[in-house]
Image (spheres, rainbow, N blue to C red):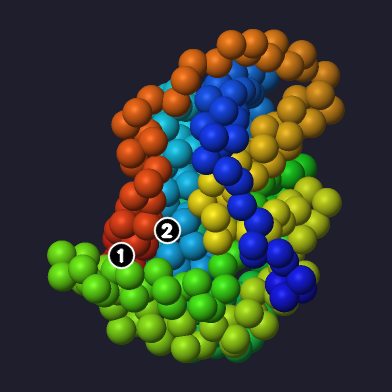
Amino acid sequence: MLEKIDLTRELPKQEYKALMPRLQRRLYDLEKACWDAKMPSVIVFEGWDAAGKGTSINILTSRLDPRGFKLYPIQAPRTFETHLPWLWRFWQKLPNYGEMAIFDRSWYGRVLVERLEGLTPLQDWRKGYRDIADFERTLADDGYVLIKFWLHISKEEQKRRFKTLEKDPLKSWHVQPEDWEHHRKYDEYVLAVEEMLERTDTEWGPWTIVEATDRRWARVKIFQTIIQRLEEALNERGFDLPEMELVPEPMPEEEEEADSEYLDAELSAEAETQAGEE
């Protein structure tokens, strides 16, 4: 499955700069429309270490109304949470009707990291597939819109990004021994990821695989997917879509500068998540 993904896809900078203001404005308008329609949504980001999850989320939320969404960087369960049903902590983070919840990693850790690193018994992570299916189906039946992304990069690209950080003495701490251990198990993770995608790709919770070698391509695809799914859901519920913005404002210079430094920010986000897991 993953070997068929074209990781050479890219988007020219000028085209990206022209598209992003329109996409950001459109998503902002849809956020307001979902609020008015009381339609909740859950956006899940999964993917390889250093694939760009953190910075993609940063760009995604930079123009949204902060009152309409919540962001959850998921870490390892706390001690008391291990004595409760494993999905309990995710139930607690579901958005109110009309709001949006964005998960930087999610319940899929049960069938990925916990599985590959031996953190969960065999029978438990296998049962996790059924638990996840029931969980997501319940959300969909209650009117939630589920949007799930897997950000995909090659083993070679991941290695290149790790080494880029290691060369900088001020940033080398971002790459820990556990990152290299996961990298060495890349092929094992591929098998687990493909099984996860196959078994949890449903009509109500489909996966979108994002070719993440080129950051501009990845971000535009993420925006377009979310916009399409929200528009379809509003139409299905009989709500009018907001009018399209004809003349979007230009991308601010500070966003262009931040865009060129995406790798540092992404690894910082990854490091924060991993520090919590430790």
* Residue 94 in view (yes/no): no
Location of the C terminus (image quadrant): bottom left
Residue at 35%, 28% in the rendered image: 253
Quick one: SS at disc 2?
A: loop
Residue placed under numbered mark 2 in the picture: 74
Packing grade of label 2 (10 A; few <14, some 14-19, many >=20) is some
User: x, y percentage for residue 99?
Assistant: 54, 30
Between disc 2 and disc 1, the foreground one is 1
User: x, y percentage for residue 243?
Assistant: 69, 11
As displayed, is residue 93 above or below residue 134? above
Q: CA distance from mark 2 to mark 1?
A: 12 Å
Location of the N terminus (image quadrant): bottom right
Q: Are marks 2 and 1 in contact (CB under 8 Å)?
A: no
Q: Is residue 3 left or right of residue 53?
A: right
Q: Which mark is residue 271?
A: 1
User: x, y percentage for residue 207?
Assistant: 71, 56
Q: Amino acid at mark 2?
A: Ile
User: x, y percentage for residue 16?
Assistant: 56, 37
